[in-house]
Image (cartoon, grey):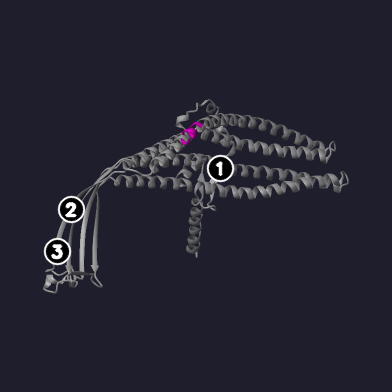
Amino acid sequence: MKKYILSVFTFFLVGMSFAQDDVLRLSMEEAIDYAVKNNYNNLIAAKNIEAAEERKWETTTIGLPQINGKVDYQYWLKQQISLLPAEIFGGQQGEFAEIAFGTKQSINAAVTLSQLIFDGSYLVGLQSAKTYLKISEQAKEKTELGTKEAVINAYGNVLVAEKSIEILENNKKILSKSLSETQKIYDNGLTELENVEQLQITLGTLENNLRNTVRLKAIAYQMLNITLGNVTNKKVELTDTLENLVFQETDLSLLAKSFNLENHIDYKMAKNDEEANQLLVKLEKSKALPSLSAFLNYGVNANSNSFTFFDSNQDWFDYSLLGVSLNVPIFSSFGRSSRTAQAKIKLENSSIRLQEIEQKLNLQAQTAKSEYQLSIENHETAKKNLSLAERIEKKQQVKFFEGLSSSFDLSQAQNQLYTQQNNYVQSMLNVIAKKAQLETALNVPVK
């Protein structure tokens, strides 16, 4: 019996350890690193780079030797008839003899080696493949920056929900106690029913807010899991607190950080788009150049009226051919010039877009710095206002139970406190979110 109990106890402990290990514990930085590796968009971006590398090699192979094999088998269900003068075979002049040339079956097998010698579009294609790879790499970098900001916001939303629940539960505890004491005073006939009812209204509103925040917390965890690249019901435990993150994310030196336009990923992508359109213009122009290729083949064929091709005495006849092909574009009814003109227009548009990006990114950086500084200032103000609201509410509590103020005055003080508590929590989230936005605007890379 003792052994049975010990086995059950051991199994229980092992099960508990596995359950604990199943929980994903993450700090903010760990969450960012985890998402960069596992986020759905990042995984797709990494696959796109692999596809771009394969495409680059595919383009390269066009200019490398190509070997192709071919086997043709023919069986005449009814052979074609040719007419020859009958006098060749001793017949009457003016008459024709019906002759079937060849055998009913034949096989032809050949191997061809081809090599592109010169093609202007191929050279441009090689450059385009490299540019396409660069585009995919830049897209992954931008995706990682977006993932970082998304994780910070999702992580912060979870902490805000948890902090809000903590505050609301504490408020509910205090308010329930006040309502209970007021109810006793009313039962003794020392206060009006209105004072009890006013506290009941406030408590009911508070309980509704608490239930809604609990639901929002569950949704916030699901959103965080999606951002991390997990299933929505994955158990996650956050090791950072809202207060610690605000302390870590308050970095005034970031406001003095200079903005390097040429290093910004959006600018590099726009520049790359301009380069791609330049290559498109080159490609259309290259199509007016001649192309030169060569080939060498070797083949064998055999003929028979019956299928004897695998017999040792079957006769096979080999052949070989060497050739060079020169293709010279002469006149396309101005189709090539029209396509070149279209490519030039695309290039001009990408240059205009690049200028627009320059202005937008500079303004975006300035705006993000301003909003980050404002979020820090608002947080300091919210902290002071919360301290004042707490003192005011406590004074109103004392006055109310001493009969020096009404329940309406107490309700106003309580609602003011709840508003300042919410403002304080949101101000902490804004500091975190606005710093993430500023780092994205300044193109601070993911560590």
Q: Looking at the picture, how far across and down is residue 290, in whole percent?
A: 29, 42
Q: Amino acid at mark 3?
A: Trp
In the displayed structure, 419 sits above or below 103; it is: above
Residue 344 within the magenta-colored segment of the rendering:
no
- In this rendering, the answer to whether 17 lies above or below 137 is below
> Is tag 1's residue or tag 2's residue first in the polypeptide sequence?
1
Residue under the point 30% across and 47% down: 62
Where's residue 261, x and y in %?
48, 29
Q: Quadrant of residue 106?
A: bottom left
The residue drawn where x is 13% and y is 68% is 314
Residue contact at pointers 2 and 3, CB within 8 angstroms: no
Mark 2 belongs to which amino acid?
Answer: Leu
Report the magenta residues as a range: 349-355
Mark on residue 321? 2
Left or right? Give the position of 13 relative to 158: left
**Residue 254 on image: x %, y %:** 53, 28
Picture quadrant where residue 289 is located: top left
